[in-house]
Image (tube, rainbow, N blue to C red):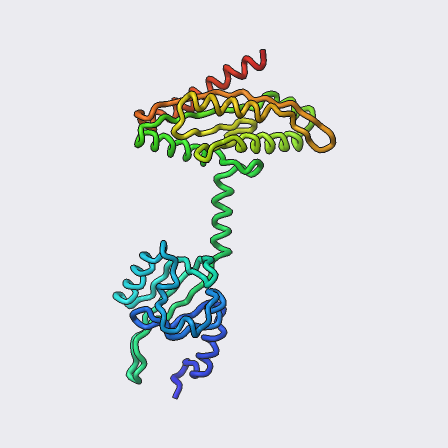
Amino acid sequence: MVAPGELPPADRRSAFSNAPMGVLLATPTGLLVDVNPAFTRMIGRSAEELYGTSVLELVHPDAAPAAVEAFAELVERRQTMRHETRLVRRDGSLVPVQVTSSWVDGTPDGDPPHVVVIVEDITDRKALEAALVHRSLHDPLTGLPNRILFNDRLHHALERGRRERTPTSLLGIDLDGFKQINDQYGHPVGDEVLVAVAGRLTSVLRASDTAARVGGDEFSIVCENSGRADAEALATRLRDSVREPLHLAGGLTLPLTVSIGIGTVEGDVDPERAFGALVREADDAMYVDKARWQD
């Protein structure tokens, strides 16, 4: 007899089979005894392959310790547990998931205790989160890091310099005559120029360098493990790269130059004190270089 409010066995099985999210039934040791079609599609494996395997075997090795801990806590507390992890599909690709696990006690009718696991694919949510984080840390026009990420990268470089006793250099860069370009040709052309300059800057950087747009036509480059000689060599490459005339749509060709200032600190300085001093040194040197261009 079916208790009031309880689904008949056939209906329960239909709900299990047609659930839009993955549903697993596992033993208290984590061995799979049943999976629904939504989960097999999600993981790219058949139900026959999954029966008798451990649910923890499906977790990516990097996420396995946290998954093992969460499952052990579930068995110990016998309460509903929720956590995020990454599963490995048959083809080796990863799927981020939110897992909700519940302990079910055995019944007087002989049903053994088991674990019910609801698995939700959160790929779209993770992609949206990543996009929002990227947008908050990058300039929407050029795609370069913005001032927030620039500050973080500079702090990171200075911390590394103190740990490894290596110098850190900073290049402050200003595009010469940008106001005149905007005034004469309009902001759409100005935007094209900024995007092109950003591309030229990044084309000559090392993997450890970080270029950022920190203002309207102002850029900065953080150079880890770099003394003044390395920074000066980079500045020369930057000038040569930017100096190439820029050919825009409609036959417009613009000559470009930049003013560059360099700041350098040694590796045995306090990062908090060095941060402001390094930025000021690069800015002051950039304005001196700009004054020569204007003369």
228 displayed left or right of 293: left
Residue at 51% in and 28% down? 219
Residue at 61% in and 21% down? 177
256 over 33 or under it: above or below: above
69 displayed left or right of 227: left
Q: Give the residue furthest to the right.
A: 250
Q: Give the residue furthest to the top.
A: 295
Q: In which quarter of the image is residue 291?
A: top right
Viewport quadrant of the C terminus: top right
Residue at 71% in and 33% down? 249
Q: In which quarter of the image is residue 166?
A: top left
Residue at 56% in and 28% down? 216
86 displayed left or right of 259: left
x%, y% of residue 111? 32, 81
x%, y% of residue 213? 52, 31
115 over 228 or under it: above or below: below
176 displayed left or right of 222: right
Viewport quadrant of the N terminus: bottom left
Q: Give the residue furthest to the bottom.
A: 1
228 over 135 or under it: above or below: above
Q: Quadrant of residue 47?
A: bottom left
x%, y% of residue 232? 47, 21
x%, y% of residue 217? 56, 27
53 over 265 or under it: above or below: below
Residue closest to the eye, 199 or 81: 199
**Picture mark count:** 0
